[in-house]
Amino acid sequence: MTFSKMKFTQHFVSFSLLCTLLATAYLAYMAYGTNIILAKISSGHKLPAEELHILIQSLASIESFGGIILILTSISMLSFLIWLYKSYKNLLVLNKVPAKFSPGWAVGWFFVPILNLYKPYQVITELWNESFKNSSKQGFAVKQGPTIIKIWWLTNVASQITSLLTNGAASQVKNIQTLPFAEIASHYLALLELITISSILSVFVVAGFIFVVFNINEIQRSSHQGSLNSGGA
């Protein structure tokens, strides 16, 4: 089995994750700005026609942007899982012994309902620990990496729960068109508050993915180069 340097894979994963992060951050910004206008309406304030027009445009933009983020997230996760599979295969080359999780199950646990709330955390933790096992580096990433991964994964679970609540609130909003305008605004306000929270959590989650990919790729590449140098010596 040969070692995979994954330069293209790392760059593609990092780029797609970065695009997702920026798009999600912008969605949070749009949702927060729209919240301010909706809060005025739900409290009984009458808005000028110009502001109402801006509000309608903002709601439409948020809905469209949500679709773009969904596509970016799908691309990011697919590329991340490809990277994860290859990184787990590299462990066998570096450590000469099989890891607890096979490359196939390292990816597969992300698709098992309920278990995907904690099994992928175990997968990433093992990948991190096994990749850094023979490293002499003592930087911030090495010392704080496991703690950062734990906080990151808890944030990811919170983000998934918030996304489910957001989807539920979005379904309810579709059935309130006959209510008074102030009440409709109140329902939309609750929805956009959830979108804002969900987007902020997602930003931290995506940043965590970037942290994991970058550091594991660097240490695996460094360890492989070290083994080649020592072998050549």
Image (cartoon, rainbow, N blue to C red):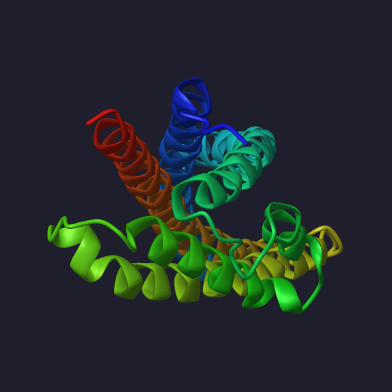
Spot occupied by residue 190 in the image (x, y as percentages of width and height):
58, 70
Position of residue 183 measured from the top left corner of the image (x, y, whole percent): 67, 70
The residue drawn where x is 44% and y is 33% is: 14
| Pick the front one: 21 or 187 | 21
For the C terminus, which image quadrant? top left
Quadrant of the rendered image containing residue 172: bottom right
Between 19 and 224, the one nearer to me in the picture: 224
- The residue at the far front in this view is 233
Give the answer, above or below, for where 228 lies relative to 129: above
User: In the drawing, does residue 157 fall left or right of residue 165?
Assistant: left
The residue under the point 17% across, 57% down is 136
Q: Residue at x 45, y 58 (%)?
A: 205
Up-down: is 189 above or below 7?
A: below
Report x, y in % for residue 218: 32, 40
Q: How many marks?
A: 0
The percent coordinates of residue 29 (x first, y second) are: 39, 46
Quadrant containing the N terminus is top right
Location of residue 61 (image quadrant)? top right
Residue 45 appearing in the image: no
Q: Depth check: 176 or 93 in front?
A: 93
Left or right: 193 in relation to 219:
right
Residue 72 left/right relative to 170: left
Q: Using the image, determine if residue 15 lies above or below residue 157.
A: above
Q: Is residue 159 visible?
A: yes
Taking depth in this image into account, of 154 and 195 the one nearest to the observer is: 154
Left or right of residue 206: residue 86: right
